[in-house]
Image (tube, rainbow, N blue to C red):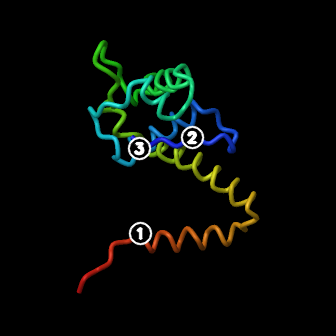
Amino acid sequence: MQIHITSSDGVPIYLQIVNQVKYLVASGRLAPGEEIPPIRTLAERLLINPNTVARAYLELERAGIVTKRQGSGTYVTEAGSTLSRREKLKVLARRADALLAEADHLEVSLDELVDLLRERHEAMQPVEKG
């Protein structure tokens, strides 16, 4: 599970973890039933306080994205894998907000950003053989 924390966008670290796990689940990169790293392991990897990870996991559990199995770990739930369209858009909205803030900081206009997104979208499309 790849989680990246940044202190520059003003979003609390626990929320960054929550948002990124939701994104990984919504995109299918975390499958139903898949175990997520133990709290201490993720905290050590991200160099953050374990309480921060615990808070994120609690939020994810409350949202029905993950479930704790006593003595076994924390796993993606079946319900978590089928986030509603509204939830998926909320996850993307947060990422869009961060992208827009970064573009503003780098003095990149909205038009330039939209052009860049279109270019990246086209570059990601599979090449048709024929």
Camera-nearest residue between 88 and 12: 12
Q: Do the residues labelled 2 and 3 touch (CB within 8 Å)?
A: no
Distance, label 2 to label 3, CA atoms, is: 15 Å
Local packing at callout 1 (Cα closer than 10 Å; few below 14, some 14-19, many 20+) is: few
Query: At 69% from the left edge and 44% from the top edge, which residue is drawn?
Result: 8
Q: Where is residue 7 in the image (x, y as percent from the top left)?
A: 66, 40
Of the numbered discs in the image, which one, if any, rests on residue 24?
3
Check the image and name the residue furthest to the top. 70
Secondary structure of the residue carrying tag 3 is helix
Query: At 74% from the left edge and 59% from the top edge, which residue is drawn?
Result: 104
Q: Position of residue 87 (x, y in %)?
A: 48, 41
Query: At 57% from the left edge and 33% from the top edge, which residue is drawn?
Result: 15
Q: Name the residue under label 2.
A: 5
Q: Position of residue 81 (x, y in %)?
A: 34, 38
* Whether residue 69 is situated above or below residue 98 in the rendered picture: above
Which of discs 2 and 3 lies nearer the camera? The answer is 2
What type is the residue that disc 3 sits on? Leu
Secondary structure of the residue carrying tag 1 is helix
What type is the residue that disc 1 sits on? Met
Of the numbered discs in the image, which one, if any, rests on residue 124?
1
Camera-nearest residue between 60 and 82: 60
What type is the residue that disc 2 sits on? Ile
> Which numbered disc flags the more N-terminal residue, 2 or 3?
2
